[in-house]
Image (spheres, rainbow, N blue to C red):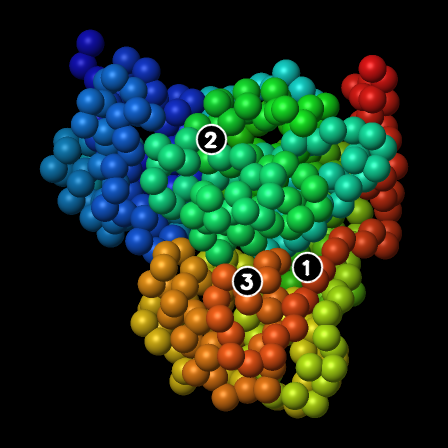
């Protein structure tokens, strides 16, 4: 039987998972290449044979997505599989046009072919856009379950941007584990809030191996918590699905792939940030939930913001560092740091553009919508150093750190800093604690 030549179009996450769950060992297909987009400097690698399997003795090369049309021709590709997230429908179909024009089919794999079944009950936390509030929702779920004596192991959507073999299965229990695994800023933003609260979180490349390790974690495991990334749907079959929506981007829940999938699959929907969004925007989001998933429970919540040193903001000229993915491909023009600056009476927000160097300049060129905020970009040593230099070049009184990690722990900042923290606070509808009580009762958790 002749194998069909395949390219998987990805961004170092969903693409590898789709390969592992559907194409690895599948005699009908030959995956000739991955393409990489969205994240800087992740092309030029290979998916190693140790992960790809014996059918790929030389591994699978990873190219820039810009080379897609030429790759289809040179590898005689019959089918391209789109496999990354938080992408506008127009962009998805634009990529499909490139694929079809080159003569190949365009495919989207769904949950039946890619989701894994756990031996433990699974709660998934996903969102319709990156930056909607998944992280604080995941933390709220975990804290509630742990307070009830339930042992929770979190598994994070992948961010394998380094040595893929070394990242096959990663376990994080302490802050020191972040350094051991050479984490990027994006990874630390997701893992550090978990480990600082005493919770174990897994991530990596092979999510079947990760699931087995999580289920058998030495600390014990009653529940798996899927902590989603971007707006992707869960890699694991969920017994309770929670999806977070952002009224600062009303209508995006029906315009971005695969966020609408997450919305339609949800048991519980959370409209977050209602304290800082307009009533009209909230109504649009609520109406779209009711139209697409009328059986979903709706909770309205805010992201309660606290600041370590508010006196460093009031009447000060501030430089704001926000969560990278949220304000780059997430499309947000403000974040928690900006909200804190406005609420606490900053004198001015300093424009970081004139002070940018190196890869930070590249980031602004790639994402021209990013205004007077500095994305916390740090996918490699060079980019991290450029972030540090940009901050230290800036003429400001205070640096507001609006990311979930303490940047001053990993770079040297030559001026006063204050961190912004944000937690989920349910305001309308049933609270998560009540929903989790029903979940615990249904699966008889904590009875042994």
Picture quarter with the C terminus:
top right
Which residue does the numbered mark 2 point to in the structure image?
Answer: 169
Q: CA distance from mark 3 to mark 1?
A: 33 Å
Residue 175: percent from the left, percent from the top? 58, 48
Q: Residue furthest left?
A: 74
Which residue does the numbered mark 1 point to in the structure image?
Answer: 247
Q: What residue is shown at x 20% (from left), y 22% (from top)?
A: 57
- Going from N to C along the chain, the mark reached first, 3 or 2, is 2
Q: Is residue 118 left or right of residue 222?
A: left
Helix, strand or loop at label 3? It is helix
Q: In the rendering, which numbered label is found on residue 409?
A: 3
* Residue 88 in sight here: no
Q: In the rendering, which numbered label is found on residue 258?
A: none
Mark in the foreground, 3 or 2:
3
Q: What residue is shown at x 83% (from left), y 51% (from top)?
A: 426
Helix, strand or loop at label 1? It is loop
Q: Is residue 106 above or below residue 186?
A: above
Q: CA distance from mark 2 to mark 1?
A: 35 Å
- Going from N to C along the chain, the mark reached first, 2 or 1, is 2
Q: CA distance from mark 3 to mark 2?
A: 25 Å
Q: Residues within 10 Å of mark 3 (few under 14, many from 20)?
A: few
The answer to whether the residues at label 3 and label 2 have Cβ atoms under 8 Å apart is no
Q: Residue furthest top?
A: 1
């Amino acid at each position: 039987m002749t194998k069909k030549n395949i390219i998987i179009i990805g961004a170092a996450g969903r693409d590898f998972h789709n390969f592992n769950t559907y194409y690895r060992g599948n005699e009908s297909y030959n995956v000739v290449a991955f393409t990489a987009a969205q994240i800087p400097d992740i092309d030029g690698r290979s998916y190693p044979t140790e992960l790809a399997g014996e059918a790929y003795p030389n591994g699978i090369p990873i190219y820039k997505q810009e080379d897609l049309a030429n790759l289809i021709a040179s590898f005689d590709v019959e089918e391209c599989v789109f496999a990354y997230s938080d992408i506008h429908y127009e962009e998805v179909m634009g990529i499909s046009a490139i694929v079809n024009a080159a003569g190949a089919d365009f495919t989207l794999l769904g949950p039946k072919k890619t989701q894994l079944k756990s031996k433990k009950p699974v709660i998934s936390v996903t969102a319709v856009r990156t930056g909607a509030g998944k992280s604080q929702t995941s933390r709220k779920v975990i804290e509630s379950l742990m307070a009830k004596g339930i042992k929770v192991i979190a598994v994070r959507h992948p961010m394998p941007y380094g040595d893929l073999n070394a990242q096959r299965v990663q376990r994080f229990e302490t802050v020191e584990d972040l350094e051991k695994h050479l984490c990027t800023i994006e990874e630390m933003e997701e893992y550090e809030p978990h480990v600082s609260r005493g919770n174990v979180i897994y991530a990596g490349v092979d999510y079947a191996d990760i699931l087995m390790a999580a289920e058998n974690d030495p600390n014990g495991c009653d529940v798996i918590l899927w902590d989603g990334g971007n707006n992707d749907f869960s890699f694991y079959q969920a017994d309770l699905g929670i999806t977070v929506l952002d009224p600062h981007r009303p209508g995006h829940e029906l315009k971005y792939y695969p966020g609408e999938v997450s919305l339609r699959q949800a048991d519980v929907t959370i409209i977050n940030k209602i304290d800082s969004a307009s009533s009209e925007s909230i109504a649009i989001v609520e109406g779209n939930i009711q139209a697409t998933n009328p059986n979903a429970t709706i909770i309205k919540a805010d992201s309660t913001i606290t600041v370590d040193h508010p006196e460093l903001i009031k009447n000060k000229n501030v430089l704001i560092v926000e969560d990278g993915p949220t304000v780059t491909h997430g499309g947000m023009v403000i974040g928690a740091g900006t909200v804190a600056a406005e609420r606490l009476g900053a004198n001015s927000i300093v424009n970081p553009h004139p002070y940018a160097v190196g890869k930070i300049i590249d980031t602004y060129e790639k994402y021209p919508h990013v205004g007077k905020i500095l994305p916390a970009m740090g996918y490699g040593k060079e980019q991290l150093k450029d972030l540090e230099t940009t901050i230290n070049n800036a003429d400001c009184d205070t640096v507001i750190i609006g990311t979930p990690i303490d940047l001053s722990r990993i770079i040297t900042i030559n001026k006063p800093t204050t961190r912004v923290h944000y937690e989920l606070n349910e305001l309308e509808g049933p609270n998560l604690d009540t929903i989790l009580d029903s979940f615990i009762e249904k699966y008889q958790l904590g009875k042994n």
